[in-house]
Amino acid sequence: MLIKNLRREHTDQTPMWLMRQAGRYLPEYRELRKKAGSFLDLCYNPELATEVTLQPIRRYNFDVAILFSDILVIPHALGLDLKFVTGEGPVLQKLETQSREAFGQSLADLENNIQNVRTFLNPVAQTVKGVKAELSAEKALMGFCGAPWTVALYMLDNKPSKASDVTRTAAYAYPDLFDKLMDILVESSFEYLSSQIENGADAVQIFDSWASQIPDTLFEKALLRPTLKLCRLLKNKFPQTPIVLFPRGLSESKLLRLTDEGAGLFDGLSLDYTVDLQWACDNLQDKVCLQGNLDPVVMLSNPQKIKEEAEKVLKIATQKPGYIFNFGHGILPSVPVEHVAVLAETVQNWQKS
């Protein structure tokens, strides 16, 4: 169903999966996380990461398994130190940007490590292979990576939720070097996603979780050019593999521009919970499959409200072919598992008009 909807073909039911569906809200995940040691150890352990990826499929019968990994494995593979600190999240070694020389040398070091990306991230490829071997034929496996802009924010600012000053300064002060950073991330992500597809991923999603931090003057440089370049590389090599973009926080005009300029380069557009869904269906759904955009905070309310809000989304988005049910961002760790069961039952029982 996922692939058919990404091709905007008719299906009787609506496929669903949830961003961060394999995560801390699940008691079985928390148990496995303790067993693994660190979060990165879990990401790089194919046996455990396979189990984590499959946990929500077994519990809720979702149509799509999303690979369990993290967007920061790319800078880790490029040679930057990475650790996950309890209560703080990811701590990534920052690139040097105090001068043009320092920034240039940092990029040279990264560039030298592109050739190591596939080998370094082979455990993730093995997870993809393991999940695909266990997944039933009617279920799809979604691979993913972070978009160049979002990954760059972690490499330069470390905490995108607080600021993007260093990244934006680098883009303005050293435009050629910023372009080089984007190219390094495009090439590394291409190698990483290629490995996932070759090992069984049916589709891939590119997460631009901090697209909202891109100023209008940098939109082409930071998002449009590198993201569509990555899509073009993937489509040239894997023309049958659908690509979904998740540019969180983009305005309607920029979503429209991305869809028009990226015509034929990607197949699905995942919408965050601020986007007017009716507008998106009216203006975008004849061009790309839409995904999203239920507010994940709804899941903290009550079963009746969850059902009502999910049905509002479904009523709007299923009038045309090409829709995948999802949140407008990741599931929260405090969501009760029973509430997710209500949501799954609501979507799975929805009959298209």
Image (tube, helix red, strand yellow):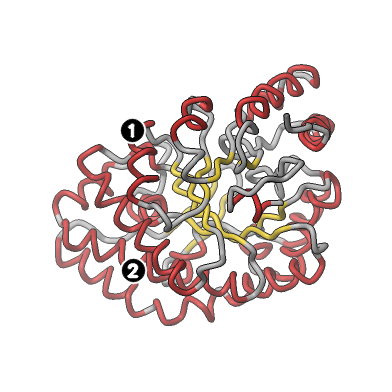
**Residue in the foreground of this view, choosing between 13 and 252:** 13
Q: Residue at x 67, y 25 (%)?
A: 315
Cβ–Cβ under 8 Å for marks 1 and 2: no
Seen in the image, is 318 located left or right of residue 329? right
The amino acid type, in three-letter code, at marker 2 is Ile
Left or right: 104 as drawn, with respect to 300: left
Indicate the amino acid at tag 1: Ser
The residue at 15%/67% (across/down) is 101
Q: Residue 288's x, y, as percent?
A: 50, 46
Which residue is denoted by mark 2 in the rendering? 184
Q: Quarter holding the C terminus?
A: top right
Q: Is residue 280 left or right of residue 69?
A: left
- Secondary structure beneath dot 1 equals helix
Q: At 76% from the left edge and 57% from the top edge, which residue is drawn?
A: 139
User: Considering only vertical position in the picture, is 121 above or below 242?
Assistant: below
Say what secondary structure mark 2 lies in. helix
Q: Residue 31, position in %: x, y? A: 81, 52
The part of the image, by quadrant, that contains residue 301 is top right
Which quadrant of the structure image shows residue 52? bottom right
Which residue: 52% across, 72% down? 194
